[in-house]
Image (cartoon, coloured by chain):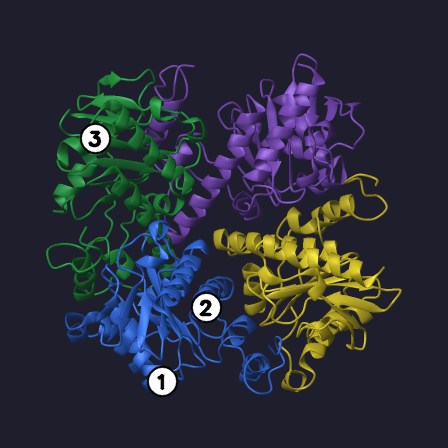
Chain colours: A purple, B green, C blue, D yellow
């Protein structure tokens, strides 16, 4: 894929998040990787969405060196590159400060599986990381944010292909997917799940996760070799 | 009615749900039945609304066989056909994952009649089914979802002509009506009732259902032979 | 004023409520009175807003007789006429089922004066009526709804010129004003006050009304002979 | 800067608040100062936003005398001038009644630092003033509102350059910034922080402020000489 195309796709994904109102001003970023070339395109730092152009995207390699682009890359770039290096088959990463997802992250709570909308997308609660240690905060912070996510997945034995979203405690959501469009989709779905879960607890504070059988039924009718949801295209 | 017309109506109803923001991506489906021909048109599975066309609708018979259409029908099709078979005079069925209605379904709570907005539409709480048994989940799940709804109506002695909506526990709302447009209307009204009921409980957690006399007054000024609401057209 | 003009104004006020999303489908109505002629124009019953035309408005006299118009008038017409007869200087009445205002009405709670946004408009809580008696419900219900409002104002010694809004318990809001545009404004302001008050109690359930001095300061800088808010036009 | 330009900028800032739905009707005002001339442009009192024109803005000096303009200036003008006189390097002031911010002000609660969205903008809770004394209310109220803000900053040893927003108890938010556009930005960000903080407490009522290290990390990566966020333009 040529850089131009990579930038176009990345710009469209960024703009979609803004149009869907998951991002205001500069509160987020999306990136797309070209695995063959080992580079990804990412939103530049601090450029407001209403002024963002496809040509402003920055091409970065996995050692966080700017390969092409005049602007400084997103301050969250190192988090993206840690995710690309560890989650070897993802094609895109998205970070937003969408309010319902942020609220769960600020509450330091994972989002439990309260219904089939959640189970349609993942069989597990949306994990929330632990609060970062002072060493990590004072060190290479954005890289450590990525490490914290990887660590959470290792510790809880989660697989990034099944669980394509995470809440960074005190901060907000990161999502990914096989394509950047899927990462955008996951951010929007996560915001919806976070909203539904809050409303559910307000109606019934004693509610528990739904049973394993129902989770599996919904997940596996959409995913894996026995799925029967969607078109075979 | 020709298939083309049946598809057009069904497509318009699906799109209305999307325009009214009750559905994002592929989170729902609407269908329309032609009772004379014993077939219904329904949204295809997993096709996002922004790309949906009238010709994509699938014509299905009441044994869930595709009569016309190249695409695979909605994964919830069997739930629709159970409703059509048991509720003999309904003309349309709608399923969404609209957030306030889903929250009540996830909280496993029926929505009580808290005011006249509710009583204008039904004299009873919006019923919430029990959680499905493992046998039903592992069996013909979508058909069993329909059976669960029918069972709930039988057990609670409810009539589908008066109560045109239900919450499937842990899942979300289904609505129906004499026409598909009425089923869409009911989904939008249900979301509004679910929102108002949540806000009401947040203001006053001790609130009870309104009295029978007020429920009946509002319902019967809009429904039945002594109604005096609307135009005689 | 000619009927045509009266209908035009009333239609514009009705449409404004719909555009501002205080009303969905047929959930509300606005009317305008011509005091000289002793008639008012009101929305017809059950006609959805997207199809509503100025010529559909119905001209009614204060004995609830249709003076002009082919359609049946709003089912709430008698409530409007009671308000016009008792509140002798109002020019318009509005009724909606906007969700936050309805929630307070369903919770059977008056909205206390929690801040200056409220005090800018009225010095008193937004009163909520008592629940209507069975006799009143089974009698001339819509007229009794009006009577219930008048009774509430008498019992609590409130003046309709200062308090231009009320919550009918288990039902929803009615507002009025010197002009129909002011009645529309009051419905929108009430919905905002209802929303702010709910959020305030969620943050601090122990909160009390603000002090009299602050209420008076805000109210009287906008109203009465010493007001200094707005333009002298 | 010529008055015409000052008015244009101020009008654009006012309209932006309205377009972003932070203000309905006349519920707010924005102003811009020209330090060289010692005058500021501000919205006229009580003129609804849909009719507001750039030429309607009023030019006022720091003794609250109208320098140019036919309309009466905003009733909150004296609050603006107190802020301009005490916060010597701010370029704009904004006041709104946006619902989430107002809710915190009405709840008489400062908004604690619950996450990085907040820390990206300020290292401190958003302060809420004490309730104004009766003397201040009955005195020069709008000037005293400004004094109350200044007093809050002095008492709590806050600096206006770092904390560009405040909640006036029982009233609502005021924000400012080096430019009027920055003051508008701060009002929108504050509303977002207020919303996220409410949702966070609803999920976890026991939540505490995030740790100092994380606050500083986020604040100083965006502000000060070691910042690395945004472009060097």
Instruction: Determine whether, in the image, residue A20 is placed left or right of residue A57.
Output: left
Label 3: which residue? B33
Residue at 61%, 75% (x, y): give it. Answer: C230
Which of the pair D81/A167 is nearer the observer? D81
Q: Which mark is residue C156?
A: 1
Which of the pair C134/D122 is nearer the observer? C134
Q: Which mark is residue D123?
A: none
Quarter occupied by residue B51: top left
Residues under labels 3 and 2: Cα distance? 45 Å
Of the 4 image quadrants, the one containing the C terminus of chain A is top left
Same chain assignment for discs 3 and 2:
no
Vertically, is D11 above or below C232?
Answer: above
Q: Assess disc 1: are there few (<14), some (14-19) or many (≥20) residues with their C-alpha within 10 Å of its C-alpha.
A: few
Which of the pair A52/D15 is nearer the observer? D15
Q: Chain of mark 2?
A: C
Q: Position of residue C177 (x, y in %)?
A: 43, 75
Same chain assignment for discs 1 and 3:
no
Vertically, is B225 above or below B149?
Answer: below
Residue at 11%, 59% (x, y): give it. Answer: B226
Q: Secondary structure at mark 3?
A: strand
Q: Position of residue C174 (x, y in %)?
A: 36, 69
Residues under labels 1 and 2: Cα distance? 27 Å
Quarter occupied by residue C28: bottom left
Label 2: which residue? C181
Residue at 46%, 56% (x, y): give it. Answer: C20
Quarter occupied by residue B74: top left
């Amino acid at each position: 894929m040529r850089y131009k195309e990579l930038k176009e796709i990345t710009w469209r994904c960024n703009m979609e998040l803004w149009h869907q109102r998951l991002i205001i001003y500069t509160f987020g970023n999306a990136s797309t990787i070209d695995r063959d070339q080992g580079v990804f395109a990412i939103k530049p730092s601090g450029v407001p969405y209403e002024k963002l152009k496809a040509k402003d995207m920055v091409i970065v390699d996995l050692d966080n060196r700017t390969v092409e682009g005049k602007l400084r890359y997103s301050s969250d770039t190192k988090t993206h590159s840690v995710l690309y290096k560890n989650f070897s088959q993802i094609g895109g990463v998205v970070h937003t400060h969408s309010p319902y997802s942020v609220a769960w992250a600020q509450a330091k709570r994972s989002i439990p599986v309260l219904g089939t909308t959640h189970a349609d997308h993942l069989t597990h609660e949306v994990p929330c990381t632990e609060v970062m240690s002072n060493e990590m905060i004072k060190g290479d912070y954005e890289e450590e944010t990525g490490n914290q996510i990887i660590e959470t997945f290792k510790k809880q034995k989660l697989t990034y292909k099944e669980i394509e979203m995470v809440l960074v405690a005190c901060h907000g959501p990161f999502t990914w997917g096989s394509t950047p469009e899927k990462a955008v989709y996951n951010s929007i779905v996560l915001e919806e799940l976070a909203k539904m879960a809050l409303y559910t607890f307000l109606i019934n504070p004693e509610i528990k996760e739904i049973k394993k059988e129902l989770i599996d039924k919904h997940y596996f009718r959409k995913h894996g070799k026995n799925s029967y949801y969607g078109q075979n295209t």
